[in-house]
Image (cartoon, grey):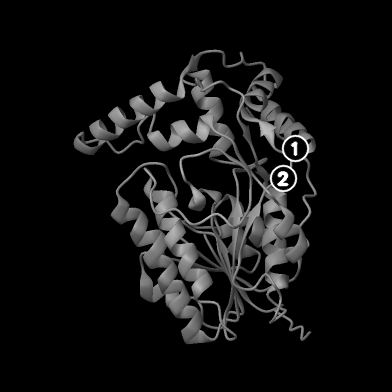
Amino acid sequence: MVVESLKSSVLVTGGTGFLGRRLVERLLAEGRSVTVLGRRPAPDLEKRGVRLIRASLDDAPAVAAACAGIGTVFHTAAKVGVWGRYADFFRTNVLGTRALLAGCHAHGVRAFVHTSTPSVVYNGQSLAGADESLPLTTDCPSPYPLTKAIAEREVLAANSTALRTVALRPHLIWGVGDPHLVPRVLARARAGRLRIVGDGKNVVDMVHINNAVDAHLLAEAALSHPAAPAVGRAYFITNGEPIALWDWINDLLRALGEPPVTKRISLRAASAMGAICETLWRVLPVSAEPPMTRFIAAELAKDHWFDLTAARRDLGYEPRISMATGTENLVKHLRQSP
């Protein structure tokens, strides 16, 4: 089998975000030349030699031009969220990805590692031990999974001998420095606004930030093999340790000296509340996300854990940071920096 070196200049979209920044730091530690496409300033990264292009995925000419001189693109940027106008998600997640692929073709980029999400296989059901054979969603009450599914499909369809592509689906990225998942859970719990949805026994997968970065670097390495099985495929990426979601949340709260969540709401009631909120938010002049949606209700009540067989086999992926170690480090950090 022919093996090519992809140790060339890299472009990281969303390189100032949680996953993107950690990936950039690892690439710099490997001595790679890094360009970041992002909307926020990052003077600390620029001081370390990173070339920063201030642009959003909405700016197609800037996105395409950023691919000049690049060997590998890590596309971690996206519009995330459970609520908003479909057109806004489509413009960033689909049109932005198309502009990036066009730039890759125009400038001879060889490898494209796309950060997708497990929600691209949303079907309204519990997912227990699900694998990559599940079809991409075309019917979801949230625009994020719908547009990410379109983007993933197009990235994998773009795979060729000239541009090799792969999609990763990390689930619930967390760890020290997480600005989204754990902070939102803690804020809602402290405000008395967090409820156990359903019977509280649902099992989910998460992935520690370090493991997610490992997976992205392994995916790039896999693309150096022209006939490798990873080329043109998607992979679930998790810690491989499914947890009882509400037990983990309550253990985290107790470790931080906070009262556990005990109030409950049925999935049916939460879904009905979500439908009402969605209707109101469509007509009310508010920009904040509604407190409940049908998608959130399903995510908080149902199983979501995945089979890592394919990622282990094709990428050589093996989680290095366990749930126990990651949680211990997170608790220590939050106690020191509440």
Quadrant location of residue 168?
Answer: bottom right
Rendered location of residue 42, percent (x, y): 54, 58
Rendered location of residue 326, percent (x, y): 75, 38
Rendered location of residue 305, percent (x, y): 64, 42
The residue where tag 1 is placed is: 323
Name which residue lies at 76% across and 58% down: 312
Q: Which residue type carries mark 1?
A: Met
The residue where tag 2 is placed is: 239
User: Cβ–Cβ below 8 Å for labels 1 and 2?
Assistant: yes
Please indicate, yes or no, whether residue 214 appears anywhere in the rendered image. no
Name which residue lies at 67% across and 41% down: 175
Rendered location of residue 204, percent (x, y): 63, 36
Left or right: 98, with 49 as reference point:
left
Name which residue lies at 74% across and 84% down: 4
Quadrant location of residue 292?
Answer: top left
Query: Who is closer to the viewer here, 91 or 335?
Result: 91
Q: How many marks?
A: 2
